[in-house]
Amino acid sequence: VYTASKAAVVGFSSGLRAEMRYKGLPVTVSCILPGIVLEAGMAHDKSAQSGADIGKVTAIFGWSYPAETASAVVNAIRHDSPEVFVNFPPFRPIAVLLSMFPRLGDFLLDIPLPI
């Protein structure tokens, strides 16, 4: 459900941005994708509750810090960026690979994770 809702937010943001530009309205939309946020947020809270190390997850999907996400929001507004991936290592190459090789996602999901 989480992944589907995130995909919906990205799609909605993209469509809304295009519609605002098409209609010539002075509104812009940016979608900030921080990945797994260390020191705060859902992944941090789940890890703290369970005592699990999220190192294996961040090794695959990357990570970011709250200050980096805040900075990405400011930069997206300043530069009118449609999408900003914040995490390191960058997730965009993985997203491209998943589009090219859909079974790669199955492989990644088969890797045992601590959560």
Image: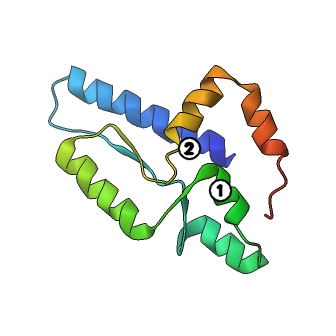
At horizontal 65% and vertical 56% (from top left) the residue drawn is: 59
Indicate whether 115 appears above or below 87.
below
Q: Where in the figure is residue 76, as x and y percent of width and height?
A: 27, 48
**Which of the numbered marks, if any, corresponds to residue 59?**
1
Indicate whether 114 appears above or below 98.
below
State the residue in front, 32 or 13.
32
Give the left or right position of residue 49, taking residue 41 as reference.
Answer: right
State yes or no: discs 2 and 1 in contact (Cβ < 8 Å).
no
Circle 2 sits on which residue? 6
At horizontal 22% and vertical 26% (from top left) the residue drawn is: 21
Please state which amino acid type lies under the numbered disc 2.
Lys
Which quadrant of the rendered structure holds the N terminus? top right
Q: CA distance from mark 2 to mark 1?
A: 20 Å
Quarter of the image holding residue 106? top right
Q: Where in the figure is residue 30, as x and y percent of width and height?
A: 33, 43
- Crowding at mark 1 (Cα within 10 Å: few <14, some 14-19, many 20+): few
At horizontal 24% and vertical 39% (from top left) the residue drawn is: 28
Q: Of the residues tagged 2 and 1, which is closer to the observer?
A: 1
Say what secondary structure mark 1 lies in: helix
Please tell me which of labels 2 and 1 falls first in the chain: 2
- Crowding at mark 2 (Cα within 10 Å: few <14, some 14-19, many 20+): few
Give the left or right position of residue 55, taking residue 68 as reference.
Answer: right
At horizontal 53% and vertical 75% (from top left) the residue drawn is: 39
Say what secondary structure mark 2 lies in: helix
Please state which amino acid type lies under the numbered disc 1.
Ala
Indicate whether 85 appears above or below 101.
below
